[in-house]
Image: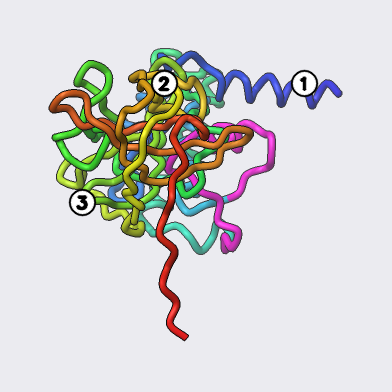
């Protein structure tokens, strides 16, 4: 029982820190798989952080750690970490450069122990938080993107659409990014915002350097009409934050239907003056929609 409580407490410390904590797309030594580290670089970190640093070498390749223990808890919070069910073992995975760095880090830890110091003047292990969205919309999957990119996000595929957050909506690739597919050169994304909710929108391909292998989205684009006044949200998963109110009789373009837990959503496109917008409205807010049936050749 005591061990279970310790493990639970550790998970809380590592994963449930405030939103101001560092984003979870972080390497202690970002280039330790490409070049030899120096003694000065290694000794710039505290003893405990270096334990994570040499395990980071193996975590890059999907090494599984003991469930519930500190290294498992830490790496599960990193967006780049994915467990490889076919992990071949520690011996085969590292290059000569990585083995040299492993040895250097281990030697530094051994010297610190011999000197009875945790190297308190060095950098501590950075704080992390578990920023995974617990329940995604169907069709969305987590994608890994190179860190330190900031992508503008619009309601729809193009700058003619509204941009949330007072025209500043942006997703940082230092946090988790989920995507559904492509439309007109933009990637449909979902990500957590600072308030704890999520935003669904589109990031132009020109704003990032990653190659995201996802399908082209084929939305229905059926003309429809609002029959019951209600709100439109860009967050159908958590906070349900409204971005507009639609009155009966308002014309919209029905794009798709999403099913999330106990709520069904219609995904619609509409305009406010010259501004195009997209968002989610509860099922039943629109007048009945009549889609064309496919023609089947016998």
Disc 1 to disc 2, C-alpha distance: 43 Å
**255, above or below 243, in the image:** below
Label 3 environment density (alpha carbons within 10 Å; few <14, some 14–19, many ≥20): few
- Please, what is the dominant secondary structure of the magenta stretch? loop
Residue 187 in the image: x percent, y percent? 28, 46
Q: Quadrant of the N terminus?
A: top right
Whole-percent x and y of residue 89? Answer: 58, 60
Q: Which residue is mark 3?
A: 184
Name the residue beneath numbered marker 1. 5
Image location of residue 137, percent across then percent down = 50, 41
Residue placed furthest toward the right: 1
Query: Quick one: label 1 or label 3, which is nearer the N terminus?
Result: 1
Distance CA(mark 2)–CA(mark 3): 27 Å
Which residue lies at the image location 22% right of the left edge and 42% below the top edge?
157
Q: What's the CA distance linking mark 1 and mark 3?
A: 50 Å
Secondary-structure class at tag 2: strand
Task: Choose between 145 and 5: the one closer to the eye.
Answer: 145
Observer-nearest residue: 239 or 291?
A: 291
The answer to whether residue 58 is magenta is no
Q: Residue at 56% across / 51% down in the picture? A: 83
- Judging from the image, what secondary structure is the residue with disc 3 in? loop
Q: Which residues are magenta?
A: 64-88
In front of the other: label 2 or label 3?
2
Residue 231 badge: 2
> Does 16 appear above or below 110?
above
Q: Which residue appears at 31% of the width and 49% of the height?
A: 221
Quadrant hosting residue 42: top left
């Amino acid at each position: 029982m005591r061990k279970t409580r310790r493990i639970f407490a550790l998970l809380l410390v590592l994963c449930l820190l405030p939103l101001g904590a560092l984003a979870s797309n972080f390497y202690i030594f970002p280039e330790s798989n490409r070049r030899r580290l120096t003694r000065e670089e290694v000794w710039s970190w505290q003893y405990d952080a270096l334990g994570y640093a040499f395990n980071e070498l193996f975590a890059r390749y999907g090494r599984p750690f003991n469930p519930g223990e500190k290294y498992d808890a830490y790496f599960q919070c990193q967006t780049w970490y994915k467990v490889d069910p076919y992990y071949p073992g520690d011996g085969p995975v590292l290059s000569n450069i990585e083995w040299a760095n492993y040895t250097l880090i281990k030697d530094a830890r051994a010297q610190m122990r011999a000197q009875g110091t945790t190297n308190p003047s060095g950098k501590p292990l950075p704080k992390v938080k578990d920023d995974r969205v617990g329940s995604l919309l169907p069709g969305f999957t987590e994608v890994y993107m190179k860190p330190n990119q900031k992508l503008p996000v619009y309601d729809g595929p193009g700058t003619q659409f509204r941009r949330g957050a007072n025209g500043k909506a942006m997703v940082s690739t230092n946090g988790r990014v989920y995507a559904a597919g492509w439309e007109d050169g933009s990637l449909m994304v979902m990500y957590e915002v600072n308030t704890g909710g999520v935003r669904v929108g589109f990031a132009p391909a020109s704003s990032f350097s990653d190659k995201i292998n996802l399908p082209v989205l084929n939305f229905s684009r059926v003309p429809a009409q609002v029959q019951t006044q209600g709100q439109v949200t860009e967050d159908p998963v958590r906070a349900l934050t409204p971005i507009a109110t639609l009155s009966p009789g308002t014309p919209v373009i029905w794009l798709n239907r999403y099913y999330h837990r106990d709520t069904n959503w219609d995904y619609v496109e509409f305009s406010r003056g010259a501004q195009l917008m997209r968002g989610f409205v509860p099922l039943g807010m629109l007048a009945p929609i009549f889609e064309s049936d496919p023609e089947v050749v016998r």
